[in-house]
Image: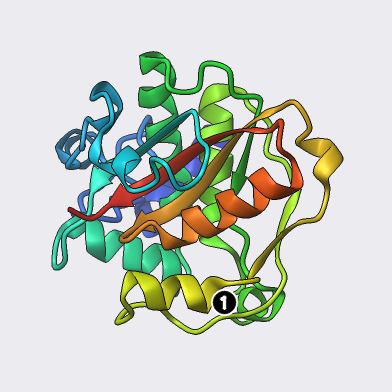
Amino acid sequence: MKGILSDIAGFFMPRTCHMCGCTLRESERTLCVRCVETLPRSLYHRMPLNPMERRFAGIVPFVRATGHFIYSRNSELAAAIHDMKYRGFPSVGHRLGEIVGEELHMAGFFSGADCVAGVPMHWWKQARRGYNQTDFIARGIAEATGLPVVDALEASRSHKTQTAMTLEQRLANLAGSFRVKDPDALRGKGLVIVDDVCTTGSTLRSLAAEVAAAVPDCQIYLLSLCVTV
């Protein structure tokens, strides 16, 4: 009976790939296999002192850092990220998080990590949007790796959009934006901090600095779904 109802629902409301619009197979979720295979991987996790790590080296303490997909404007991936953030499609973030989690888990990126947390969003901004997309990315990574998601970080104040700002302006804009609300949850742990798109690295840099100051024995891993070049 369940299979019949599923077939009927599929006929009237076919499941389609969020990127290319093709009909999804039963085993596919949110994105089709072709689109998943053609996502632009950076392969930074295979490189010693990769371009992502160079953004943070000597500035904040971290174990490893990477951005998994290369972000470029006007690409299919950029359109999907825009939908994920602003058009009410957090499931895109969850699926991409699963993909990143699966691939980096096999590569050993999470070795020594104990938990995952998305970059927190101020409560007012999240109330207007309805969700925090990095939470969905973190949950996807958690499902792929078995690492738990921890609710230990918070955005203590709102900040302006940073699209047109320089690195220095972004850092000033983010000053005092984040707080570790549950230090005990991170003591002696390896924490993977997850962001959606890393441009200058200011968000991850600011948040990592707060974690390092509040919980000095926390081992920090920096992971962005996408990274600009």
Q: Residue at x 49, y 42 (%)?
A: 6
Q: Is residue 120 left or right of residue 172?
A: right
Q: How many marks?
A: 1
Q: Quadrant of residue 119?
A: bottom right
Q: How is the image coloured?
A: rainbow
Q: Residue at x 40, y 49 (%)?
A: 10
Q: Residue at x 42, y 55 (%)?
A: 196
Residue under pointer 1: 129
Residue 132 in view of the camera: yes
Q: Residue 73 appears at what percent x and percent y?
A: 16, 66
Q: Residues within 10 Å of mark 1 (few under 14, many from 20)?
A: some
Q: Residue 173 appears at what percent x and percent y?
A: 50, 78
Image position of 214 with respect to 88: above or below: above
Q: Residue at x 28, y 51 (%)?
A: 227
Q: Nearer the viewer, residue 194 or 95?
A: 194
Image position of 84 with respect to 123: above or below: above
Q: Residue 33 appears at what percent x and percent y?
A: 23, 34
Residue 135 in view of the camera: no
Q: Nearer the viewer, residue 81 or 183?
A: 183
Q: Is residue 88 left or right of residue 198?
A: right
Q: Nearer the viewer, residue 23 or 41?
A: 41
Q: Is residue 130 left or right of residue 161?
A: right
Viewport quadrant of the N terminus: top right
Does dot 1 land on a helix, a strand or a loop? Answer: helix
Q: Residue 157 appears at what percent x and percent y?
A: 68, 77
Q: Is residue 195 left or right of residue 26?
A: right
Amino acid type of the residue that numbered disc 1 sits on in the rendered structure:
Arg
Q: Nearer the viewer, residue 107 or 83?
A: 107
